Amino acid sequence: MERDRWGHDQPSPTRDEPAEEPARNRLSDGDSDDDSDEYEEVTTITRTLKKTTYKPRVTASLASKEAGVNKKLFGKDLSEYDNMDMDDMLDQLTAEEIDMLSRDVDPDDSLMPPDQRTAYRCDKSATGPLNRKKLIDHINEQATSEPDRPEQVPFEAGIIRGKKWTPAPAPQEQQRADEQIALDLGDEYESALTDASENELVDLAAILGFHSMMNQDQYHASLLGKKLDTEEVGWSGITRASRPKPMAPEPPNTTDPEQSIESVKRDDPEVRQLNLNNIKTISAEQFGRLCQAATTNTRLEGLLVSNTAMGDAYAEKLVQLIETNPNIKEISIESNFISPPMIARLVKALLKHKSVETFRAANQRSQVLGNKIEMEITKYVEQNPNLLQLGLNFDFNDARARVSAQLQKNRDRFRTGKRSRLSCRLFRDLIWKKVA
């Protein structure tokens, strides 16, 4: 038995397996293994533990491959500078080139002198060693010889000029804590509050506006002067949800499509706005005849066909109407089944006459228009100076912001134009009165 340096017994090595054999390299046969050119087997045997690892072998072929890599800087081959001496290269530089090279050195290098760590170079000659006493005497002499600046206002004792400093006030909470409030209501009020019931206290709290001391039922009942029927609602009661009042359904639209088509065809002066909302029985043939009759109408200004189950076939006829009739100012096609590309075509059709001021087409079957359609609609809106209202939902901030800015600009232009037209009309009426 052998002992190690810590005094522990170790088994003696056998003849077949040495106790500690130095690492030896055994090269594998190149014909049997393809990886023999890149890795070599290293076997280490310590006591009775055998460990085999593989590490990359640096061969002549790999060294030649690494050496053959082209090193370039700004497209120039640098292989010719590999064997060149640095001192020889510096000797070939001129004084100006050395100065330029020294300016490109990192100023944070601690091995450089302090005066060379900055890009500033002083060309003046040195004035000699520093004489601290002479410098202080010169500063004192210059300070005493230089005359004082004259004051604009002469000094007078006892007169305060400028803003006088005053200490900051104490915090409000500290002031409230320091204050002592003494409230004397008198014997009559104290006896009244002592003998008051819970409902009377609730009414008093509602009058004084103490909303946090009561629930909603107590507050509204106190304001209306009503008495609560239930006893459950008190200072510690729970307010339950009240049953909402039933609302009467909206009456159906009684407009007759055939009669409306005839009125539009004969250019009825009373038909300024045609409301066909919520009428889902309009056929494609009826809507086509309506659009055909409206192309020659000169009095129709608004066409409302929301929630009528319109599709792209209906919208195609509406595009022809918008491009033909220059008198329509309002179009509403909300809550239908129109596709996003057709909505873009409708907005583009508004540029034909630029007479439509209000266009609503939100809440279609396809809730998302898409980035491409939104950018296309934004481009058409920016080309329309007369569009005042646009009922569409944009998902992208860029399109939403650009459309809002353009509509605001159109409304400002419309308001200023209307004001100028009104002033011209008043001026004209005044002139006519004077002439008459």
Image (tube, rainbow, N blue to C red):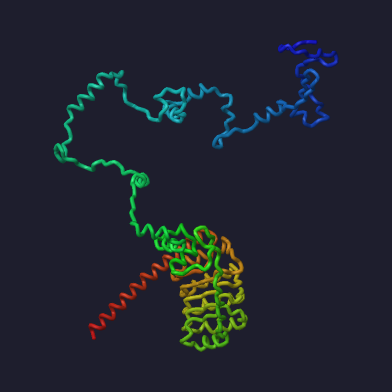
For the residue pair 300 and 193, the one nearer the viewer reads as 193
* Quarter that holds the N terminus: top right
Q: Residue at x 47, y 60 (%)?
A: 214
Q: Quadrant of residue 210?
A: bottom left
- The answer to whether one can see residue 103 in this image is yes
Determine whether 378 is above or below 317 in the image.
above
Q: Position of residue 373 (x, y in %)?
A: 56, 64
Residue at (59, 29) in percent of width and height: 79
Task: Give the vertical position of 126 relative to 359 (above or below).
Answer: above
From the top left corner, tell me how far across and down residue 279 is, in percent. 59, 80
Residue extending farthest to the right is 16
Of 434 and 205, the residue lying toward us: 205
Question: What's the residue at 41%, 25% (across, down)?
Answer: 116
Q: Is residue 14 left or right of residue 389?
A: right
Quarter residue 100 falls in: top left
Image coordinates of residue 255 in percent, x first then y, are 55, 84
In depth, the one of 66 and 426 nearer the eye is 426
Q: Residue 114 occupies which quadrant of the picture?
A: top left
User: Residue 202 at x, y = what percent?
Assistant: 45, 62
Please report the residue visible at 52 percent of the width from the left and 76 percent of the height from the top. 323
Q: Is residue 44 left or right of residue 333?
A: right
Q: Is 62 left or right of 105, judged from the image as shown?
A: right
Q: Nearer the viewer, residue 435 or 197?
A: 197
Query: In which quadrant of the rendered image does the C terminus lie?
Result: bottom left
> Is 317 drawn above or below residue 110 in the view shown?
below
